[in-house]
C-alpha cells in the first residue's frame, strides 16, 4: 500500500492544529487507560489500521493487557472492564456512529453516572479527535505497522 498524501509534510499547519487538540486533551489529565480504550474502539469501528497500530502499541507500553485490548470489541459482555470504562466505550460508540445513534438524554444520563460535565466535554473531544485522525489516515492511506511507541517513563 502506498500513501496518497503524507499530510504531515503536505499540510504541516493542519497537523500542528490536530496535535494541539491532542495536547489540550492530554494536559487535562484524563485517565490514560480510558483514552487508550476510546482511541482503540473508535479506530476499530472506523477501520483505521494506522490508528489501531499506534494506540494498541501505546496502550501496551503504558501497561494495558493484551487480554483487555483483544476484548475491546466485545466490551459490553466482558467483566475485564470497569463500569466507568464501559460508560466511556458506550459513549465512544454513540459519538463515533452519531449518524446512526444519537446521543439522546438516556445516553447522556448513562455517561453522567460515571463522569462529571468537564470530563464528558474532554472525553467527547478525545472521541472527536480520534475520529478526525481516523478519517485523515484512512483518506490518505497512511501505512500501518511502522509506528513505535515511546518508552514508558518511570513515575
Image: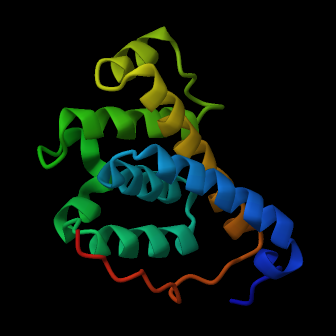
Residue depicted at x 44% and y 33%: 91
* Image quarter in which the N terminus is found: bottom right
* Residue 65 position in % (x across, y down): 19, 67
In the foreground, 110 or 22? 22
Tell me if I can see residue 130 in this picture: no
In the foreground, 150 or 47? 150
* Residue 75 position in % (x across, y down): 26, 46
* Image quarter in which the C terminus is found: bottom left
Q: Is residue 25 left or right of residue 73?
A: right
Q: Is residue 83 left or right of residue 37?
A: left
Residue depicted at x 67% and y 56%: 20
The structure's colour scheme is: rainbow
Figure label count: 0
Q: Is residue 127 left or right of residue 61?
A: right
Is 145 placed above or below 126 here?
below
Residue depicted at x 48% and y 53%: 26
Residue depicted at x 13% and y 49%: 80
* Residue 64 position in % (x across, y down): 23, 65
Q: In the orientation shown, which residue stands out farthest toward the right?
A: 10
In the foreground, 153 or 131? 153
Amino acid at each position: 500500500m502506498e500513501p496518497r498524501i503524507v499530510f504531515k509534510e503536505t499540510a504541516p499547519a493542519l497537523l500542528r492544529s490536530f496535535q494541539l487538540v491532542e495536547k489540550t486533551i492530554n494536559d487535562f489529565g484524563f485517565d490514560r487507560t480510558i483514552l487508550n480504550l476510546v482511541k482503540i474502539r473508535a479506530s476499530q469501528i472506523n477501520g483505521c489500521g494506522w490508528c489501531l497500530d499506534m494506540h494498541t502499541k501505546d496502550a501496551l507500553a503504558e501497561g494495558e493487557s493484551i487480554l483487555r485490548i483483544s476484548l475491546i470489541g466485545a466490551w459490553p459482555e466482558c467483566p475485564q472492564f470497569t463500569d466507568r470504562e464501559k460508560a466511556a466505550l458506550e459513549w465512544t460508540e454513540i459519538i463515533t456512529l452519531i449518524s446512526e445513534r444519537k446521543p439522546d438524554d438516556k445516553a447522556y444520563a448513562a455517561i453522567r453516572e460515571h463522569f462529571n460535565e468537564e470530563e464528558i466535554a474532554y472525553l467527547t473531544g478525545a472521541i472527536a479527535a480520534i475520529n478526525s485522525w481516523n478519517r485523515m489516515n484512512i483518506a490518505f492511506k497512511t501505512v500501518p505497522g511502522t509506528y513505535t511507541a515511546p518508552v514508558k517513563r518511570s513515575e
